[in-house]
């Protein structure tokens, strides 16, 4: 018995080593399964909760074109949530239980969505910075070792690039507008910059799960590597917009070929992750309300489906 | 109220999309829906928002019978020792054309 376990583990490790994908029915170590379920479901929750700060601006979008684009983006995020819950289900997770963990505050989701969207420029900043950071992470995850997760990521990445562009486009328009509009864009960048840097997670030396994730090829790059990439690609974009990243230490380092930058306030990060950000309670409250308010629809659909089955049986036995 | 106490998960459906005429349906993912019609409608909303398809199949996941990954060797290996099933196994003299 012991030996068979060992054989299975060898096969599993070989698949990982060869850069092949693990598929749902393959044997996998419990730790891998749990890590995968945790990561995929947290990702799914982030997509779903991520709709809330942006949903806040749908009715106040400044034009019909902006409104249609924002609606389409948010609808994509709902789809991303679905792809990811489905991927988690292939590992034996129960969707209702995952959602319950979110609604009771037990599950974590990306800390960024606990910040408020105070002006229309924030919608631009979210698309540009938050989706930009998410894309950086998700492009890497297309090569993750778990097949269904990787396939979901490929779909998601195809859909994401318009999210970032519509955000940048919002800011570009504001930056080319009046002085007040440009100030709005600057204010949004000031507030969203550090929370965006936090999206990649704690520093490598403080990250609990990082080593295992990299070893199992769940993640292909470390938190710090991704963060550096994000800074390097974003700085020139901010320069083009003509707004300033709120960091006095930001400077191109000729030696490393990368930008040096200030760390975000990690105490703030942990405090937000642990439920004490500006909007945590509100986000969970709104999710619970949506779930409760949708209950009659779910019940009606279930009752209808049951009735159709009964009808069919009756017709067949007649 | 705990959701999972009065839980009744809708059935899980696998979704297959034909991207254009002449191609087969390809598995794209899964979703939950109360019945087949809702599964098709949701699949349309989730998987074909950008003209990814012109036809959708949905199959309740429980109706799919899959081969056992543990039997990969016994199921699929025999093919690898039958190279004579491939045209490259046969040497055709250079003078012989159109074969
Ligand atoms: Fe997304
Ligand atoms: Fe995402
Ligand atoms: Fe997005």
Image (cartoon, coloured by chain):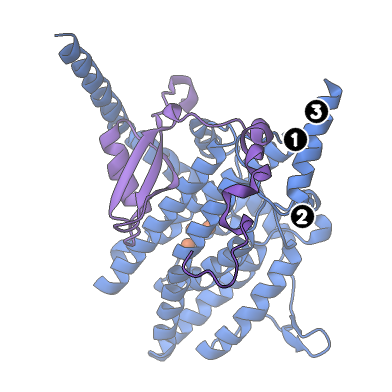
Closer mark to the observer between disc 2 and disc 3: 3
Q: CA distance from mark 1 to mark 3?
A: 10 Å
Report if residue A289 is visible in the image.
Answer: no
Asked whether, in this view, residue A127 is left or right of residue A140, the answer is: left
Residue A129: % across, % down: 55, 71
Asked whether, in this view, residue A203 is left or right of residue A306, the answer is: right
Q: Residues within 10 Å of mark 1 (few under 14, many from 20)?
A: few
Q: Which residue is mark 3?
A: A5
Residues indicated by labels 1 and 2 sit on the same polypeptide chain = yes
Residue B42: % across, % down: 32, 44
User: What is chain A's hue in the picture?
Assistant: blue
Quarter of the picture containing the C terminus of chain A is top left
Quarter of the picture containing the N terminus of chain A is top right
Chain identifier, purple in the render = B
Q: CA distance from mark 2 to mark 3?
A: 23 Å
Residues indicated by labels 1 and 3 sit on the same polypeptide chain = yes
Q: Which residue is mark 2?
A: A214
Residue A304 tag number: none
Viewer-nearest residue: A81 or A264: A81
Q: Which residue is mark 1?
A: A29
The reply to whether dot 2 and dot 3 touch (C-beta < 8 Å) is no
Report if residue A153 is visible in the image.
Answer: yes
Q: Earlier in the sequence, mark 1 or mark 2?
A: 1
Q: What residue lies at 73% left-to-right and 63% top-to-bottom?
A: A221
Asked whether, in this view, residue A155 is left or right of residue A221, the answer is: left
Q: Earlier in the sequence, mark 1 or mark 3?
A: 3
Q: CA distance from mark 1 to mark 2?
A: 16 Å
Residue A235: % across, % down: 62, 83
Q: Is residue A239 above or below residue B44?
A: below
For the residue labelled by badge 2, is the local secondary structure a helix, a strand or a loop? helix
Q: What residue lies at 68% left-to-right and 58% top-to-bottom?
A: A269
For the residue labelled by badge 3, is the local secondary structure a helix, a strand or a loop? helix
């Amino acid at each position: 018995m012991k030996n068979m376990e060992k054989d299975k583990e060898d096969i599993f490790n070989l698949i990982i080593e060869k850069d092949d994908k693990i598929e749902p029915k393959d044997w996998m170590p419990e730790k891998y399964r749990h890590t995968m379920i945790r990561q995929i479901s947290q990702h799914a929750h982030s997509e779903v909760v991520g709709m809330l700060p942006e949903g806040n601006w749908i009715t106040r979008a400044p034009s019909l074109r902006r409104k249609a684009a924002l609606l389409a983006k948010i609808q994509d995020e709902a789809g991303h949530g679905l792809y990811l819950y489905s991927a988690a289900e292939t590992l034996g997770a129960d969707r209702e239980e995952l959602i319950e963990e979110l609604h009771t505050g037990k599950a974590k989701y990306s800390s960024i969505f606990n910040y408020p969207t105070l002006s229309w420029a924030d919608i631009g900043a979210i698309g540009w910075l938050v989706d930009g950071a998410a894309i950086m992470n998700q492009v890497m995850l297309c090569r993750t070792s778990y097949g269904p997760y990787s396939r979901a990521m490929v779909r998601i990445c195809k859909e994401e690039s318009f999210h970032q562009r519509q955000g940048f486009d919002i800011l570009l328009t504001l930056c080319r507008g009046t002085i007040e509009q440009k100030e709005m864009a600057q204010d949004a960048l000031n507030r969203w910059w550090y929370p965006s840097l936090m999206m990649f997670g704690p520093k490598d030396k403080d990250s609990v799960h990082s080593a295992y994730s990299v070893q199992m090829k769940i993640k292909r790059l470390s938190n710090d590597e991704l963060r550096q990439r994000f800074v390097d690609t974003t700085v020139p974009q901010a320069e083009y917009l003509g707004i300033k990243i709120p960091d006095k230490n930001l400077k191109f380092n000729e030696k490393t070929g990368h930008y040096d930058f200030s760390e975000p306030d990690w105490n703030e990060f942990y405090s937000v992750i642990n439920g004490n950000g500006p909007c945590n309670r509100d986000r969970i409250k709104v999710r619970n309300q949506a779930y409760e308010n949708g209950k009659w629809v779910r019940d009606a659909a279930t009752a209808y489906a049951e009735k159709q089955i009964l009808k069919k049986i009756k017709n067949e036995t007649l | 109220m705990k959701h999972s106490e009065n839980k009744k998960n809708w059935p899980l459906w696998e979704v297959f999309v034909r991207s254009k005429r002449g191609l087969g349906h390809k598995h794209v993912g899964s979703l939950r829906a109360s019945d087949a019609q809702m599964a098709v409608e949701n699949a349309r909303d989730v998987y074909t928002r950008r003209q990814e398809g012109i036809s959708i199949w949905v199959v309740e996941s429980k109706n799919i019978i899959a081969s056992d990954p543990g039997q990969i060797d016994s199921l699929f290996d025999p093919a690898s020792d039958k190279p004579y099933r491939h045209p490259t196994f046969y040497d055709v003299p250079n003078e012989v054309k159109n074969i």
